[in-house]
Amino acid sequence: MGTIRDAKRTRQRILDAAAQEFSRKGFDGATMLGIAQRA
């Protein structure tokens, strides 16, 4: 079973990946798949 610490780490990885995806591809080019692959 996961811990709160694991959940926070996962959340941060997703947010970091989303920031990278949006900065590289812009709002129209960013996709959930791209974010998931980066995370």
Image (cartoon, helix red, strand yellow):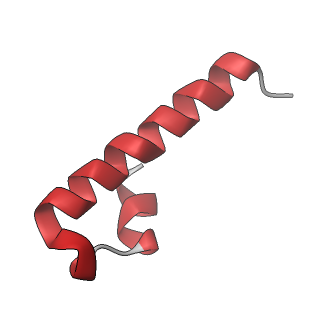
For residue 4, above or below residue 11: above
> Which of the image's four quarters has the N terminus?
top right
Q: How many marks?
A: 0
**Would you identify the image quadrant in which residue 4 lies?**
top right
For residue 11, above or below residue 6: below
Residue positioned 25% across, 73% down in the render: 27
Q: Residue furthest right?
A: 1
- Coordinates of residue 22 in the picture (x, y in percent): 23, 62
Q: Residue furthest left?
A: 24
**Would you identify the image quadrant in which residue 18 lies?**
bottom left
- Coordinates of residue 5 in the picture (x, y in percent): 65, 17
Residue positioned 34% across, 49% down in the render: 17
For residue 15, above or below residue 32: above
Residue positioned 77% across, 20% down in the render: 3
- Judge from the rendering whether residue 19 lies leftward or rightward of residue 4; answer left or right: left
Q: Residue furthest front?
A: 27
- Coordinates of residue 26 in the picture (x, y in percent): 17, 71
Residue positioned 25% across, 60% down in the render: 21
- Judge from the rendering whether residue 30 lies leftward or rightward of residue 14; answer left or right: left
- Coordinates of residue 15 in the picture (x, y in percent): 41, 44
- Judge from the rendering whether residue 38 lies leftward or rightward of residue 13; answer left or right: left
- Judge from the rendering whether residue 31 lies leftward or rightward of residue 6; answer left or right: left
